[in-house]
Image: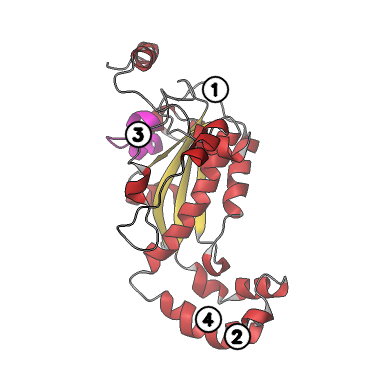
C-alpha cells in the first residue's frame, strides 16, 4: 500500500473480530516502526508493553476495562500499552547524541562533538530540562510520534487499530512497570469485524480553520488541484455521512452478532 493511502485508510476500528488472532510478526513490525521514529536528542522515551488478550487473567482483564473503552478492550485480541520513560535522559547522559556525532548525523559543521555534548549540551540543556515542569509534556510528544508510526504500520499490515486511554494507575500495577514510566495511551489491535472504511473518513474541521500562513489569522489557502491529487492517491477519501443507512445496517448486524444493545 502506498503511504498516502495508508493515511487515508486509517480509521479508529471499534468492532474487532475477537476470534481471529493477530500474527506476532505484525505486532513486531508495528514496534519496529515505532523504534525508528524521530525523537528529540535521540533519547527514545517510548516504551510499550504488549498484552495478548488470551494471556491475561480474568482479574487483569476486568481491571483494564473503562466505561468508555470496555467493549473495545473486550473485542481486541492485542493491546499495546504505551509509556514515557522519564528516567532515560539521566541514564544515558547524552551518549545517544554522541552516537549521532559518530555516524555523521550531527556534524562538526554545526558545532557538534563529544566534547560539546559533555561540556554544554548535557549539563546546560538536557539535565536542567529533566527538572522543568514541561519535561513530561515535551517528551510525550515524541512518544506520540512513535505511536503514530506504529498505528500506520498496523493499517499497512491490514489490521484494525484504535487508540484509547485506559486507567494509568491500573496499567502500572497490572504490568508492573517502573515507577518512572508515565502511562499514556493504548493501541488496540485486531482484524476488523466491521468494514475497513467504517462508513467513510471521519468529520474534521475545515482545512483553513486549522492552518495559518505567515501569522495567525491568515489562512493557509487550500489548493483544489492538490486536493484532487490526494483524492487520486486515496489519502482523501469519501467522507462519512450522517445517519448513513448502510452504516446503520452494518452496526445493527454487528450488534446482533455480538449480542450488543442497539
Front residue of 78/249: it is 249
Say if the magenta span includes residue 160: no
Name the mark nearer the viewer: 2 or 1: 2
Q: Secondary structure at mark 4?
A: helix
Point out the frontmost of discs 4 and 1: 4
Mark 2–mark 3 distance (CA, rounded to whole Å) = 48 Å
Q: Which segment is the magenta one?
A: 59-72
Q: Which residue is mark 3?
A: 203
Q: Earlier in the sequence, mark 4 or mark 3?
A: 4
Residue in the picture at 33% in, 51% down? 169
Residue 38 is situated, as x and y percent measured from the top left of the image, at 56, 59
Question: Where's the C terminus, which quadrant?
Answer: top left
Quarter assignment of residue 22: top right
Q: CA distance from mark 4 to mark 3?
A: 44 Å
Between discs 2 and 3, the one toward the N terminus = 2
Res. 233 in view:
yes
Describe the element under mark 3 as helix, strand or loop: loop
Disc 4 marks which residue?
122
Residue 116: image tag? 2
Q: Residue at horizontal 48%, vertical 56%?
A: 143
Which sits in the foreground, 18 or 254?
Answer: 254
N-terminal of the two: label 4 or label 2?
A: 2
Foreground mark, 4 or 2, reads 2
Label 2 Cα neighbours within 10 Å, binned few <14 / some 14-19 / many ≥20: few
Amino acid at each position: 500500500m502506498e503511504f498516502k493511502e495508508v493515511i487515508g485508510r486509517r480509521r479508529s476500528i471499534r468492532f474487532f473480530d475477537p476470534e481471529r488472532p493477530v500474527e506476532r510478526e505484525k505486532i513486531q513490525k508495528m514496534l519496529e516502526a515505532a523504534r525508528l521514529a524521530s525523537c528529540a536528542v535521540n533519547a527514545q522515551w517510548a516504551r510499550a508493553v504488549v498484552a495478548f488478550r488470551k494471556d491475561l487473567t480474568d482479574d487483569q482483564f476486568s481491571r483494564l476495562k473503562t466505561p468508555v473503552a470496555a467493549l473495545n478492550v473486550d473485542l481486541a485480541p492485542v493491546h499495546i500499552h504505551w509509556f514515557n520513560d522519564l528516567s532515560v535522559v539521566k541514564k544515558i547522559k547524552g551518549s545517544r547524541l554522541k552516537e549521532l556525532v559518530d555516524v555523521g548525523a550531527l556534524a562538526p559543521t554545526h558545532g557538534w562533538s563529544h566534547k560539546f555534548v559533555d561540556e554544554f549540551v548535557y549539563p546546560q540543556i538536557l539535565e536542567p530540562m529533566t527538572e522543568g515542569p514541561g519535561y513530561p509534556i515535551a517528551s510525550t510528544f515524541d512518544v506520540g510520534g512513535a505511536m503514530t508510526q506504529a498505528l500506520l504500520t498496523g493499517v499497512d499490515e491490514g489490521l484494525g487499530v484504535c487508540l484509547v486511554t485506559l486507567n494509568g494507575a491500573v496499567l502500572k500495577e497490572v504490568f508492573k512497570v517502573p515507577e518512572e514510566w508515565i502511562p499514556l495511551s493504548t493501541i488496540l489491535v485486531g482484524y476488523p469485524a466491521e468494514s475497513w472504511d467504517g462508513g467513510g473518513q471521519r468529520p474534521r474541521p475545515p482545512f483553513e480553520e486549522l492552518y495559518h500562513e505567515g501569522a495567525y489569522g491568515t489562512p493557509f489557502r487550500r489548493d483544489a488541484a492538490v486536493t484532487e491529487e490526494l483524492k487520486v492517491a486515496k489519502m482523501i477519501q469519501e467522507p462519512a455521512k450522517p445517519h448513513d443507512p448502510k452504516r446503520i445496517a452494518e452496526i445493527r448486524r454487528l450488534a446482533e452478532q455480538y449480542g450488543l444493545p442497539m
